[in-house]
Image (tube, coloured by chain):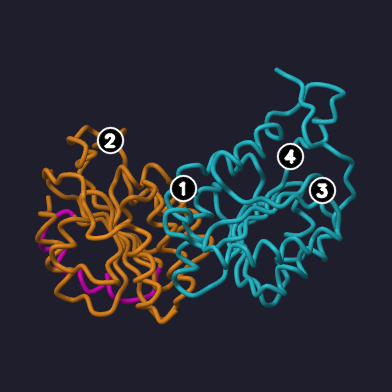
Chain colours: A orange, B cyan
Amino acid sequence: MLDKYACLRKLFSLRRDEIVVTTMSVAAPWARLSDGPLDFAMVESSMGQAPAFGLGLALARPERRVIVLNGDGSTLMCLGTLVTMAQNPADNLILVIVENGTYEVTGNQPIPGAGLVDFETLARGAGLAHVHTIEDAGDFDACLPLHFKGPGPRVFTWKVRGAEEPVPKPRAYIRQRALELRQALGQ
Amino acid sequence: MRKYAGSWCKINMIEAAAVLSEIRKNGATHVVGIPDNGSRALYRMLWTDPDIRVVSVTREGEAFALAAGLFLGGARPTVLIQNTGFYDSGDAFRGTVVNMAIPLVMIMGYRGYETMSGAGTADTAATFFEPVLKAWDVPCYVMRSSSDSRLISAAFSRSGADSLPVAVIYPGEMR
């Protein structure tokens, strides 16, 4: 099993100008590493919609890589988006499913299918070709550069140990952060 | 189930070409949504349009999240769905385009409109529609004929001026 915090630190170490969209139990730890206009927490938003939001960004800005750090519970809420990603492929889109088997920020209740659901199989079945499951630190280090290289869309499942992140509290309301992201993209 | 004697009136078939012309005139880059009987003629034209990209989604809520991302990235999306899909989209609509203040024109089919004539049991897909839009504080234009397609431009102007989603709803099937 992976340590979520170590994975985020390693991802951050290679991150340059990519847009990073975060959700739920990843939003606060990522914000402690980086909290600029290109770090967009899908908080005060709609659970499950981060991959579709990231796809929209990726389609609008094909020159810019978009990394979506989604939860496993969030992914289950909108499984159809895996098909949407395959139907509208964006080379520059990376979806990371951070799989801990629980709804962490609400008290670590188990998600439906915890331990049974195979996200790699779901993603491949949706028509996505570049799919990876990462279970240990060695695999993570080997796959880390692929988070920043085409072709995409690419899906990673990080199998992480449980933690106890509280509900994330972004530095500003989502309307303000959306405006800052748009401005950072030159719009 | 109650009968409905609301704002029903006779409608004329809307020309898909007139709607497409308005969408193009307002600089839409993407149309995001799911086809239905009402919009199939318009989708048929959009699939071959050289300037507008159709982005198909599996459920309508995705359309709003995807449109929000497109807009923040600099594109100008329009959402094209049916009223039933709008109902399903509730949290996605609220949590993305509303909370992010996205100027978005949503063209939505008014399924069941003809059942509101008072002759029989009205379809809740129709009777709920305008009350739901009103409850959610969504500005709404009703397009009942091809000449009403100019309302699409009004919707684009309003959504841009106020930075919010605006609905253009239409009964029947485009041709």
Q: Which residue is mark 4?
A: B111
Q: Residues within 10 Å of mark 4 (few under 14, many from 20)?
A: many
Label 3: few (<14), some (14–19) or many (≥20) C-alpha neighbours in 10 Å: many
Disc 3 to disc 4: CB gap under 8 Å? no
Dot label at residue B173: 3
Q: Which residues are magenta?
A: A135-152
Quarter that holds the C terminus of chain A: bottom left
* Chain letter, disc 1 residue: B
Do the CB atoms of the residues marked 4 and 1 lie less than 8 Å apart?
no
Q: Amino acid at mark 1?
A: Arg
- Chain bearing tag 2 is A
**Lower sequence index among marks 3 and 4:** 4
Residue B72 against residue B115 in the figure, above or below? below
Q: Nearer the viewer, mark 4 or mark 1?
A: 1
Q: CA distance from mark 3 to mark 4?
A: 9 Å
SS at circle 3: loop
Label 2 environment density (alpha carbons within 10 Å; few <14, some 14–19, many ≥20): some
Residue in the foreground of this view, choosing between A63 and A185 = A185
Q: Residue B94, which numbered label?
A: 1
